[in-house]
Image (tube, grey):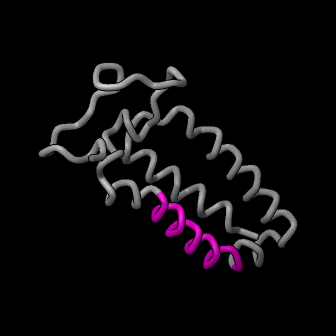
Amino acid sequence: ATMCDGGGERLVAGVDFNWTTGRTSYGMDWGLECDDFRQSMVNSSFFVGAFLGLLVSSLIFDQVGRKYGTLGAGVVGAMVMGSAIFINDYNLLLANRAILGFFQFIH
């Protein structure tokens, strides 16, 4: 049996089992450990953003040039990645991953 079996009952960290690291993950905090669809949406949103970034990159490069377009995308992408530590909601995580994907694939 896995922690997702058992008639819809979820295991509770700290009650049903103890973490060895003393910390939980956002997957456990937001109930994603047994929800395959919501788990896959986190990765899918990144690649949707990446696809859009690849499409838009040529327009950006035409306006500001390849060097400054890539540099700007890298700086903004780093800021978006750094902002991920403040995310406390699943929908914000999806938006953050899509924006991150957009700026990571402008090159």
Q: Is residue 76 magenta?
A: no
Estimate the x, y position of residue 12 in percent, counting from the top left. 28, 28
Instruction: Give the image quarter of residue 41.
Output: bottom left
Going 29% across and 42% down the picture, which residue do you hit?
A: 3
Going 30% across and 48% down the picture, which residue do you hit?
A: 34
The residue stretch that appears in magenta: 43-58
Above or below residue 71? Residue 31 is above
Nearer to the camera, 10 or 82: 10
Instruction: Give the image quarter of residue 38.
Output: bottom left
Estimate the x, y position of residue 107 in percent, counting from the top left. 76, 70
Nearer to the camera, 37 or 80: 37
Estimate the x, y position of residue 67 in percent, counting from the top left. 87, 67
Estimate the x, y position of residue 100 in percent, counting from the top left. 60, 55
Q: Is residue 72 left or right of residue 6?
A: right
> Magenta stretch: dominant SS?
helix
Nearer to the camera, 3 or 78: 3
